[in-house]
Image (spheres, helix red, strand yellow):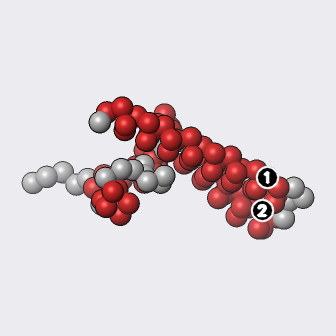
Amino acid sequence: MAAPSSFLDWLNHHLFTCPFKSHFGIDCPGCGFQRSVIALLKGNFLESLKLYPATIPFLFVLIFMLVHIKYDFKFGAQIIKITVAAIAVIILINYIYKIYTYQLII
């Protein structure tokens, strides 16, 4: 009988498929996020950054928003706006890099 697998292994085998990638054959700007979160939950920080560099900042801003809702920091909204803009830049740079390296392979 096979050994029982962990929840993260099960989750890794049941990821959502990307409709953009299935229709067009190239990654979307969000491709890699699910695998990055799983790598982060396993404690593989470097692998998480390689898979999707915006994961850690995104989770930070998500947690910060929840804390900000509770405690209403003086400059909380500005910090959230700046962080979200930085995350958007990270996603854009990462996507351009993915497209560029994809074009080099073909």
- Is 62 placed above or below 43 here? below
Mark sitting on residue 68:
2
Q: Secondary structure at mark 1?
A: helix
Q: Are marks 2 and 1 in contact (CB under 8 Å)?
A: yes
Would you say residue 44 is visible in this rendering? no
Q: 46 or 18, which is in the foreground?
A: 18
Left or right for 78, reference 105? right
Q: Give, as a three-letter code, the residue at label 2.
A: His
Q: CA distance from mark 2 to mark 1?
A: 10 Å
Q: Horizontal and vertical percent for residue 50?
A: 46, 36
Q: Residue furthest bottom?
A: 70
Q: Secondary structure at mark 2?
A: helix
Would you say residue 31 is visible in this rendering? yes
Mark sitting on residue 61:
none
Q: Measuring 87% from the left and 55% from the top, which residue is drawn there?
A: 75
Q: Horizontal and vertical percent for residue 69?
A: 76, 67
Q: Horizontal and vertical percent for residue 49?
A: 50, 38
Mark sitting on residue 79:
1
Mark 2, other Cα within 10 Å: few <14 / some 14–19 / many ≥20? some
The quarter of the rendered structure image containing the C terminus is: top left
Q: Give, as a three-letter code, the residue at label 1.
A: Ile
